[in-house]
Image (cartoon, rainbow, N blue to C red):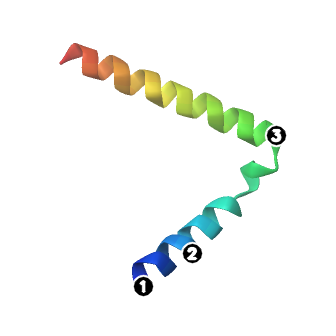
Amino acid sequence: MASLADLQQHLNRFWALPYHEDLALNDKLSEVQAWQRDRIQNSQRLV
């Protein structure tokens, strides 16, 4: 059960992050995540 309690604690911290309520910050985070996805996909194509 300790693992479930740890997971719940991590989820609580995740949902408490400010970008969930800050639209500008959420948009910027989405841009960064999209850039990271593209970068990873492009690096895998080179292999």
- Quadrant in the picture for residue 34: top right
Distance Cα–Cα, label 2 vs label 3: 24 Å
Q: Position of residue 32 (x, y in %)?
A: 58, 32
The kind of residue on which mark 1 rests is Ala
Q: Secondary structure at mark 1?
A: helix
Q: Position of residue 43 (x, y in %)?
A: 29, 21
Compared across the picture, whether 24 is left or right of 35 comes to: right
Q: Residues within 10 Å of mark 1 (few under 14, many from 20)?
A: few
Q: Secondary structure at mark 3?
A: helix
Outermost residue to the left: 47
- Label 2 or label 3, whichever lies nearer to me, is 2
User: Which label sits on residue 2?
Assistant: 1
Q: Secondary structure at mark 2?
A: helix
Tell me the quadrant of the picture where the N terminus can be found.
bottom left
Distance Cα–Cα, label 3 vs label 1: 34 Å
- Label 2 or label 1, whichever lies nearer to me, is 1
Between 45 and 11, the one nearer to me in the picture:
11
Q: Residues within 10 Å of mark 3 (few under 14, many from 20)?
A: few
Q: Which residue position holds label 3?
A: 23
Q: Position of residue 44 (x, y in %)?
A: 26, 22
